Amino acid sequence: MATQTHLDHETRLGQIVAAARDLIAGGGVDALTVRGIASKVGVTEAAIYRHVTSKEEVLILLLEEVSTSLFSAITEATSEDRGALEQLRHLLLLHFSYTELRKGISFIVIAEAAQFQEPRVRAAGRKLVQKYHELVECIVERGIRRGEIDSSVSSKAAATMFFGMVQGSVTRWLLDPAGHPLNENAAALWALFRSALASEARIEAAEAS
């Protein structure tokens, strides 16, 4: 019986997270309320409060779901049988397709976490971004060791630049999807970022391998 209760709780949490995603996709984070979640799920607010205590807790659940989903996709894009530059290129393209598929919700939730005063929400957002930065840093450092990326490149600076490039593109797309489709400047963005990491000779050698 205890096991069934646990499964019911997990199922309800999944419904709550799905409802929260739908609300944010339709009206931004301001549209995320316990009342709205209850309406989407088809239960009373009291029923929702038996599983979560606040909007902040829902955001934490969303951040955890974003992390699980995003890094599952990233694992495939950054397979180590590819060179570092190819991994980074695949990661950039993955972000754009992943963002369109999820209607930009991942970046909306991350940005919202930075605005919250509630320490747990900020900590969850910080943990996700830190994990992402560390992954990009590792790819860059691997590229340096393999001679694909110039040894003078700072892996931390490269990770910050990469994240900013994605975040900036997603922000413009969210504000004007028709005017700034995500793939509009993908090739130019990648060429610019790639040139900051390696000489043309090393780029050609990496792409030929």
Image: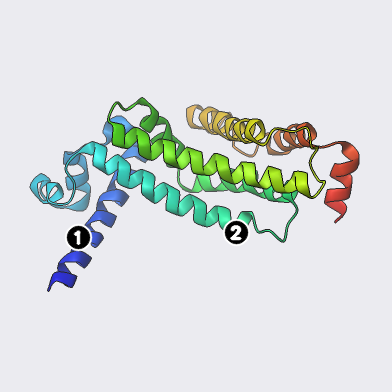
Residue 120 vertical placement versus 138 (above, below): above
Q: Label 1 belongs to which residue?
A: 9
Residue closer to the observer: 63 or 41: 63
Alpha carbons under labels 2 and 1: distance apart: 30 Å
Query: Which SS class for mark 1?
Result: helix
Mark 2: few, some, or many residues within 10 Å (few <14, many ≥20)? few
Residue closer to the observer: 207 or 117: 117
Q: Position of residue 93 (x, y in %)?
A: 64, 46
Q: Residue furthest right?
A: 201
Type of residue at label 2? Glu
Earlier-in-chain disc, 2 versus 1: 1
Mark 1: few, some, or many residues within 10 Å (few <14, many ≥20)? some
Q: Which mark is residue 105?
A: none
Q: Position of residue 160 (x, y in %)?
A: 60, 31
Q: Would you identify the image quadrant in which residue 28 lies?
A: top left
Q: Which mark is residue 76?
A: 2
Q: Is residue 90 visible?
A: yes
* Residue occupying the point 63% across, 34% down: 156
Q: Quadrant of the N terminus?
A: bottom left
* Residue occupying the point 79% across, 50% down: 146
* Residue occupying the point 34% across, 38% down: 24
Q: Position of residue 77 (x, y in %)?
A: 62, 55
From the viewer's perspective, tell me whether residue 26 is left or right of residue 142.
left
From the viewer's perspective, tell me whether residue 90 is left or right of residue 14.
right
Q: Position of residue 203 (x, y in %)?
A: 84, 43
Q: Quadrant of the C terminus?
A: bottom right
Residue closer to the observer: 40 or 33: 33
Circles 2 and 1: CB atoms closer than 8 Å: no
